[in-house]
Amino acid sequence: MSDFRFTRPDGFPPIVKNLIIINALVFIAQLTLANRFPITEWFMLWPIMPDQLHKLLVESGALETGQQFKPYQIVTHMFSHSPSTFFHILFNMFTLWMFGRVLENVWGGERFLFFYLASGLGAAALHLGMQYVRCEELLSFFQVNNYKAIQENIGAISPALGASGAVMGVMAAFAYLFPNTELFIMFIPVPVKAKWAMLGLAAIDLFGGVTSITGDNIAHFAHLGGAITGFLLVYFWNKTNRRSLY
């Protein structure tokens, strides 16, 4: 006699639900306590830079003394969003719910939470690494008084915040596990398979990361870091433990 049992997928599993609640509570704190505490400034991920560059930027007025990297920001930036626009947190949380609930139902809460946090840390690592390289270049421009190059590369000191890196990891894992799932994407009149949508997003971030576009304030390498980490994790799990993955 078969022992098969049907389990209805949870439309709002606990880890996804609690991640969204935490992000929402932090966002509310950012909005309501901004006049008393610089929560956003504390939580965002500031770049790692040479001490000499930080000193020069403070002296020039481009940075304040306290605006610098602290290790806890590697985690806190994943749970804070831009307080100037509701769309930032709305898009990230909707995407987390849309794809993350599927993965949590497949993997279980413990594995999904590990995956989500690992993707966020991978996003931070690549973002910080690329910013450090750019900060080294910025320091060399200061040393030769190349003011035009300084202005063009001042984006190297821009801090990052948001769950986008971790969410990109979630999207990469979904595209790997369910590559032919058809998605309806805003402004595209036909459905797009998940694998092509993910490759398209990665290509856009790669282009945005290696080019300098005026007004672009997206942390493209954080997105790529999250996507790469998510892909490598799910690829490794699939290779080593395929039965439990599915």
Image: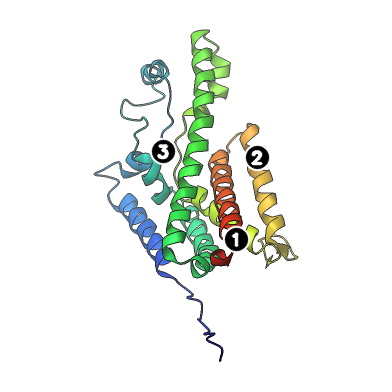
Identify the mark nearer the N-term, 3 or 2.
Answer: 3
Compared to residue 143, the image places residue 74 above or below, namely below
Look at 43% across and 24% down and name the residue there.
49
Residues tagged 3 and 2 counted as in contact (Cβ below 8 A)? no
Q: What element carries label 2?
A: helix
Q: What element carries label 1?
A: helix
Which residue position is annotated with label 3? 45
Task: Give the CA separation, mark 3 to mark 2.
Answer: 20 Å
Instruction: Give the colouring mode of the picture.
Output: rainbow
Quadrant of res 56: top left
Q: Nearer the viewer, residue 238 or 179?
A: 238
Which residue position is annotated with label 2? 206
Look at 27% across and 45% down and name the residue there.
35
Circle 2 crowding by C-alpha within 10 Å: few under 14, some 14–19, many from 20: some
Look at 46% across and 49% down and name the residue there.
118
Q: Nearer the viewer, residue 223 or 39?
A: 223
User: Nearer the observer, disc 1 or disc 3?
Assistant: 1
The quadrant the C terminus occupies is bottom right
| Whole-percent x, y for residue 117 in the image | 44, 51
Quadrant of res 69: top left
The residue most toward the right is 190
Circle 1 crowding by C-alpha within 10 Å: few under 14, some 14–19, many from 20: many
Query: At label 3, which amino acid type do we have?
Result: Leu
Compared to residue 200, the image places residue 207 above or below, namely above
Compared to residue 140, the image places residue 223 above or below, namely below
| Whole-percent x, y for residue 33 in the image | 27, 49
Look at 50% across and 56% down and name the residue there.
92
Which residue position is annotated with label 1? 174
Identify the mark nearer the N-term, 1 or 3.
Answer: 3
| Whole-percent x, y for residue 103 in the image | 53, 65
| Whole-percent x, y for residue 102 in the image | 54, 68
Residues tagged 1 and 3 counted as in contact (Cβ below 8 A)? no
